Amino acid sequence: MKYANIYQSWQTDPQGFWLQAAQAIDWYKEPQQVLNENNDGFYEWFVDAQVNTCWNAVDRHVQSGKGQQVAIIHESPITNSTSKITYAELQERVALLAGALSNKGIQKNDRVIIYMPMIPEALIAMLACVRIGAIHSVVFGGFAPNELAVRIDDCQPKAIIAASCGLEPDRIVSYKPLLDNALTIATHKTDFCVIFQREQSVAPLIEGYDTEWHEFQEHAKPIDCVPVAGNHPAYILYTSGTTGAPKGVVRPTAGHLVALNWTMKNIYDVKPGEVFWAASDVGWVVGHSYICYAPLIHGNTTIVFEGKPVGTPDAGTFWRTISKHDVACFFTAPTAIRAVKREDPKAEFIQKFDLSCLRTLFLAGERADPDTIKWAHDALNIPIIDHWWQTETGYAIAANPYGIEKLPIKIGSPSVAMPGYDVKILDNSGHDLTTGELGSIAIKLPLPPGTLPTLWNADDRFRKSYLATFPGYYETGDAGQIDDDGYLYIMARTDDVINIAGHRLSTGAIEEVLAAHEDVAECAVIGVSDELKGQIPIGLICLNSGTQKPHGEITREVVQHVREKIGPVAAFKRAVVVNRLPKTRSGKILRGTMVKIADGEDYKMPATIDDPIILDEIQEALESIGYGRK
Ligand code: COA
Ligand code: AMP
């Protein structure tokens, strides 16, 4: 069947469509009710089903005779090691850790924070939690203790599972001091921590509170999967919103299983048994969906890669890994390809490896710029497929459904809406725009299975953030347009979220840190274009009158504060002092105009600006730090 027919079949009978997709999942109790509207007016899928994620991702493959197939390959160019775990071994290890957690009182609904680098134990911890119905929340290693503390206080975990360290190319990041610091900042107290000791930095443990990973499991017995309701949260994943407080995206169990499994064949066009590699991090949604859950649910082999696109050891590391492990489908962020292209513009590394195994390269996480797509296509001679999604959805809203029909690729577009998503372009009053017109991208409710039903403990915030602007629609926060063939073009965010190297960060959160500096009276953070990372944040600060400290000292301090409070991942390296910030007459800071100035683009003088002269001052200030020249 062609894409158009499948999309149409979903439109005609959405519930039938997903019920059919649900046949590929093992249920303890099959869903009778497909879609429900709950008391809050929120939608939920497969509520009355009983199911377990770990059973579907691990045990059922062992039961069906695939126990000896490799489930996880760990490839670490940083430690120069490779290891493999079969489905049978994975089942043993996950069941044992789940047993140990259960012995320590972790039960269905309890939250567990996972703070681990790219090692298989991170996936084992995630799977052990879902095995017993505990709700995990993975926190990315590049966040500072304060961000970890915010997440601890919000989801109130009973336990934390962490590693002693992560490995960056140039340094060992000791996680334990960061974790201890976070636990001091947080008001919520956890019962215990399990620490996976890595030889690169063995952490001192706190007697009676921390237990070493192996010791923790020493007397445990493997435990079976615990059935949970279809709408039971499999996990909470925090993502950036407009303010400093991250949003806890809730992932419902059954819909997640059904939808992710559907995408593996229909979008990524892989068969069970093939090797699928998403070069991301388990701390992000791509890592949750496509390093851990989807490939395992679908019976593929997944790769946990501990390295960077370049420098570990060189710009050939992706191609070496693909060739070595017979990767059929590779998924990464455009920024990673840009990093490779910058080091190896002639793609000489690609010539060195037999890449005949690789059929497709999928890109997501940020806008895929045409140069990057063209370079990758010329170098690899395979389809380079952009697809668009968000932490909130957990899988692609728009893609080229390669397993259904290989639609023509239009460079600059992530192609067409996937079944489940009725995507509209709306004007400010919520009216449909016609093709080619730029507007807010919204999705008609209900969203499909697996997408967020709400935010953790924050129904009102969920309503305000996503449902209030356009009644009857989910507001994506992205702006764009649609063409005559139904291809989407994602142009910009409509909120204060910026995208740094495929990582989503809030300018509002960075502003909160700058504003807390004793000498800062007012500030604005903008995302300016960056050749490698797509965007990077720049701070403009106004000082309190009478401040004596040299400006250079203050800007250095605010840069350091952001690193300490949010983390190195924010890549906040530049701030500049200005006398005033440009504002509308009603006092709104004109961030968009400043972005245009910083990027050296033409801009229209905003009609509502209170004093146009300020823009010249901003231009001058930005030029002083290397931005804003045409
Ligand atoms: N733990 C601790 N620190 C981390 C970290 C982690 N897991 N990940 C990143 N950091 C640190 C880095 O060491 C760096 O610190 P520095 O300021 O001291 O140099 C900072 O955070 C920024 O890291 P990164 O974004 O990796 O930038 P980089 O300049 O080191 O590398 C790229 C640039 C493009 C190679 C890199 O950003 C990259 O691989 N991007 C792909 C991103 C991706 O896969 N996104 C997934 C979304 S689909
Ligand atoms: P995250 O929740 O971290 O996955 O970030 C989601 C946001 O990243 C989206 O709302 C977009 O702004 C951006 N994004 C993700 N994929 C794409 C894409 N293919 N093209 C353009 N923007 C994208």
Image (spheres, helix red, strand yellow):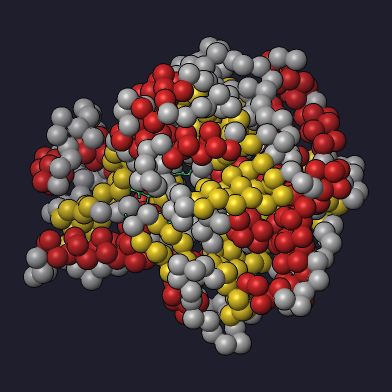
Q: Is residue 80 visible?
A: yes
Q: Residue furthest bottom?
A: 207
Q: Position of residue 404 (x, y in %)?
A: 69, 20
Q: Position of residue 544 (x, y in %)?
A: 16, 66
- Residue sitting at 27 percent across and 64 percent down? 560
Q: Position of residue 498 (x, y in %)?
A: 39, 44
In which quadrant of the rendered image does the N terminus lie?
A: top right
Vertical side of 411 occupied by 177: above or below: below
Residue 6 as seen in the image, left or right of residue 477: right
Residue 145 as seen in the image, left or right of residue 298: left
- Residue sitting at 91 percent across and 48 percent down? 29
- Residue sitting at 59 percent across and 15 percent down? 407
Q: Position of residue 570 (x, y in %)?
A: 36, 54
| In front of the other: 173 or 235 | 173
Q: Is residue 60 visible?
A: no
- Residue sitting at 74 percent across and 40 percent down? 299
